[in-house]
């Protein structure tokens, strides 16, 4: 994974936020930040779910130790995707932005849960979500996104409670539409007098996911962000 950082550091990855990431308590892995994110028309942060320390569906201690040995894990996995060692998660995510030929240069991306899961079907515990929301709150102070898209509606777990504990106003609601058997969710948070943020939770892209339908949903909800991401 160290080879990965050397390979693309001067290409489409922006590492200039890393010193600030180092100050975030319990942030296990550096987020991916595209080189155009900082000065983009919109700053779009996409939040995945978890890393899974499994091989052929079985827990791998070697994989777990590898994941925990470096802050570059998330970036390394994105690099694997670039090199065609890919997964439905990434293929379908890219399919949601069909007109973009440089998506990864424009977005910031990281996985929400800050420890590797030990089974393919493992569900994070409540404490995982409490840690994750605290990390997210600190992370957005650094990245200052304009738009946030969570991949997976279960990431909403403990959202309202966590923001309440941090003294932040948060309103969460299920949206009155059904896509791929999933009601998208929306949370709105007010962080200061001049900074508020809407969080959209969509179906996880790994299975039973129709990129074209979620493209239409996001295009309606986040027209400026989608215009920027899908721009050639």
Image (spheres, rainbow, N blue to C red):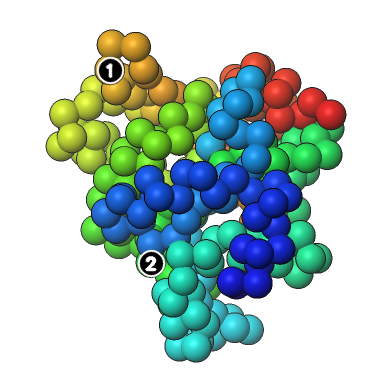
- Of badges 1 and 2, nearer the viewer stands 1
**Residue in the foreground of this view, choosing between 180 and 194:** 194
Residue at the (39%, 37%) spot, across then down: 142
**Residue in the foreground of this view, choosing between 106 and 126:** 106
Residue at the (84%, 29%) spot, across then down: 232
Label 2, on which residue? 115
Label 1, on which residue? 192
Residue at the (28%, 11%) spot, across then down: 193
Q: Is residue 162 in view?
A: yes
Which x, y percent locates residue 132? 33, 51
Structural distance between the alpha carbons of marks 1 and 2: 30 Å
Hey, which quadrant is residue 118 in on the image? bottom left
Which x, y percent locates residue 106? 67, 36
Report the disc number at residue 52.
none
**Residue in the foreground of this view, choosing between 64 and 213:** 64
Q: Is residue 108 above or below residue 31?
A: above
Residue at the (76%, 60%) spot, across then down: 82
User: Is 94 positioned to the left or the right of 42 in the image?
Assistant: right
Residue at disc 1, secondary structure: strand
Query: Label 1 neighbourhood size at 10 Å, few (<14), some (14-19), many (20+)?
Result: few
Please state, as top left, top right, bottom left or bottom right, where the N terminus lies in the image: bottom right
Mark 1 or 2 closer to N-term? 2
Q: Is residue 110 above or below residue 167?
A: below
Q: Is residue 77 above or below residue 37?
A: below
User: Is 14 positioned to the left or the right of 155 in the image?
Assistant: right
Q: Is residue 151 above or below residue 65?
A: above
Hey, which quadrant is residue 173 in on the image? top left
Residue at disc 2, secondary structure: loop
């Amino acid at each position: 994974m160290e080879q990965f950082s050397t390979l693309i550091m001067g290409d489409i990855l922006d590492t200039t936020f890393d010193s600030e990431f180092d100050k975030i308590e319990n942030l296990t892995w550096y987020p991916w930040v595209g080189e155009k994110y900082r000065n983009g028309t919109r700053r779009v942060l996409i939040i995945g779910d978890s890393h899974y320390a499994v091989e052929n569906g079985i827990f791998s201690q070697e994989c777990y130790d590898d994941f925990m040995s470096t802050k570059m894990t998330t970036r390394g996995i994105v690099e694997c995707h670039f090199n065609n060692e890919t997964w439905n998660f990434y293929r379908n995510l890219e399919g949601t932005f069909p007109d973009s030929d440089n998506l990864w240069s424009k977005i910031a991306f990281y996985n929400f849960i800050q420890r590797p899961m030990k089974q393919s079907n493992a569900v994070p515990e409540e404490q995982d979500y409490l840690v994750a929301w605290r990390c997210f709150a600190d992370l957005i102070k650094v990245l200052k996104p304009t738009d946030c898209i969570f991949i997976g509606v279960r990431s909403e777990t403990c959202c309202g409670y966590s923001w309440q504990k941090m003294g932040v106003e948060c309103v969460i609601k299920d949206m009155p539409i059904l896509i791929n058997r999933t009601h998208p969710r929306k949370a709105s948070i007010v962080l200061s007098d001049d900074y508020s943020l809407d969080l959209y939770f969509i179906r996880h892209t790994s299975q039973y996911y129709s990129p074209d339908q979620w493209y239409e949903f996001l295009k309606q909800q986040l027209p400026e962000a989608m215009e920027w991401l899908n721009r050639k």
